[in-house]
Amino acid sequence: MRLRVMTAVLVLAGSIVGLTTSPPPYTAIIIDSGSPYFVPKAVTVSTGAPIRWENPTPTEHTITHIGCMEDGAPCAFDSGIVLPNDSFTIPGLAPGRYPYFCRVHPIMHGIVTVTDSPVPSQL
């Protein structure tokens, strides 16, 4: 009986550890108050992979694709205002390079590269 209880505890502990170590179902980019402002500043993801920007700062920000600001260019994403402690997620993008910036703080910029090839985990 004691062996069964110990085995059950170990199996349960292993399950809990497995749950806490699994990667999120998206690529996370953290908005920071200092340079480089978006962490990581450049990410590479596979086609259709969700991307999430998280704003733990006390300031409002945007995540705006450069194309949204150019006449005739396609606008791939524009978050609008992302409030402190909030986030913005896009479900995925077609292959290409997507430079973006914060309209509130234009010094803040980053780039998302989307590829058809599988991308190794970026932990």
Image (tube, rainbow, N blue to C red):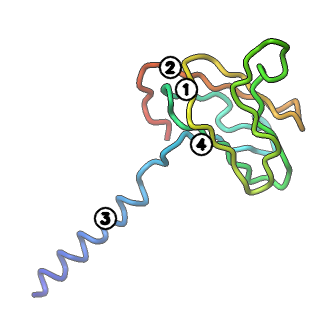
Q: Which residue is mark 3?
A: 15
Separation of marks 2 and 4 at Cα, in angstroms: 17 Å
Separation of marks 1 and 3 at Cα, in angstroms: 30 Å
Tell me, yes or no, whether the two marked residues, 2 and 1, touch with CB atoms within 8 Å: yes
Q: Give the structural element (helix, strand or loop) at label 2.
A: strand
Residue at figure coordinates x 41%, y 52% from the top left? 22
- Residue 11 located left or right of residue 28: left
Tell me, yes or no, whether the two marked residues, 1 and 4, touch with CB atoms within 8 Å: no
Separation of marks 3 and 2 at Cα, in angstroms: 33 Å
Vertical relation: 115 (above or below) 104 = above
Q: Which of 39 and 60 lies nearest the eye of the viewer?
A: 60
Name the kind of residue labelled 3 in the image. Answer: Ser
Mark closer to the observer (3, 2): 2
Which circle marks residue 44 in the picture? 1
Sequence-first tag of 1 and 4: 4
Q: Which residue is mark 4?
A: 28
Separation of marks 2 and 1 at Cα, in angstroms: 7 Å
Sequence-first tag of 3 and 4: 3
Which circle marks residue 115 in the picture? 2
Crowd rating for badge 3 (residues with CA inside 10 Å; few <14, some 14–19, many 20+): few
